[in-house]
Amino acid sequence: MDTPAAPVALVTGAARGIGRETARQLAARGHTVLVCARRTEDAVRAAGAMPGTALPHRLDITDRDGVQRLARTVEAEFGRLDVLVNNAAVNYDTGARAADADLDEVRRTLETNLFGAWLTAEAFLPLLRRSRHPRLVNVSSEAGSLAGMGGGTPAYGISKAALNALTRKLADELRPDGVLVNAVCPGWVATDMGGPGGRPVADGAAGVVWAATLPDSGPTGGFFRDGRPLPW
């Protein structure tokens, strides 16, 4: 088993957008980064363009066996995990309305955006608990903030509100273990999901990296953008 001095970070949905840039920034800061994507070739392509140590892995967060298989691989290779970034998400359902939503589509969205993140967190928690400075970051969205929530994008918005609730639950339960758990909204970012016109991807990812590299005295159970609190 290799036990690197560098922090070991795993980023889901890292083939493109916020996930890829988060992985790149963590690798540039000296982390050993596990670059995860649903297709092996996408993970390989993304990892190959990163500085430092970036290792590609196939991961579909809705596949329980696959998630547990990767957790066993990480345990065998590193013995711990220092950072888990739950970034993988689907279906910004612009144009949909809660009043007549396709509930099958909503269920599919929740399967990834909530249950996939939850499944991944559960699978890797034993390895996070072995870290001296464990961090769990759920990449969320202000679309999931109840304080300002309106109509539209029901599948995505409700899935992110649920992810925020999971963040609070995990943060409270894992506080005794020293695991800092936070939700981060990258803002409107110019990605395939966000569309053109948003802020640079690097700026959105910087807030995720901030939460992934907090000092031990940092916050837990919070919802942030650019390191500043957002209303739930």
Image (spheres, grey):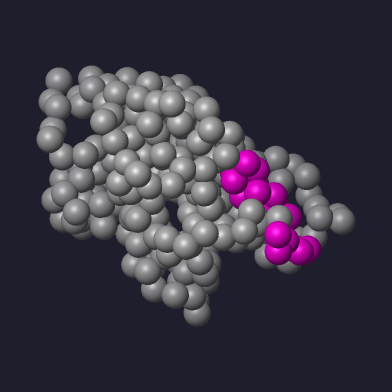
Farthest residue in the bottom direction?
A: 197
Q: Where is residue 34, by image quadrant? A: top left
Q: Is residue 4 left or right of residue 203?
A: left
Nearest the viewer among 137 and 153 is 137
Residue 203 visible in the displayed image = yes
Residue 219, above or below 79: below
Q: State yes or no: residue 156 in magenta.
A: yes
Q: Nearer the viewer, residue 161 or 50?
A: 161
Which residue is found at the position 35% from the left and 44% from the top? 217
Residue name at image x 78 percent, y 63 percent: 151
Residue 179 on image: x %, y %: 40, 33
Residue drawn at x 42%, y 61% is 227
- Left or right of 108 in this view: 83: left
Quadrant that contains the N terminus: top left
Residue 83 point in image, percent of width and height? 33, 39
Residue ID at (32%, 59%) = 21
Answer above or below: position of 101 versus 173: below
**Which secondary structure is most common in the magenta stretch?**
helix
In the displayed image of the protein, which residue is found farthest to the right?
Answer: 99
User: How far from the left and from the top, in percent, is residue 207?
Assistant: 39, 60
Q: Is residue 47 left or right of residue 147?
A: left
Q: Is residue 93 magenta?
A: no
Q: Is residue 52 above or below residue 8?
A: below
The residues colored magenta run: 147-165
Q: In the rendered image, which quarter contains the C terminus?
A: bottom right
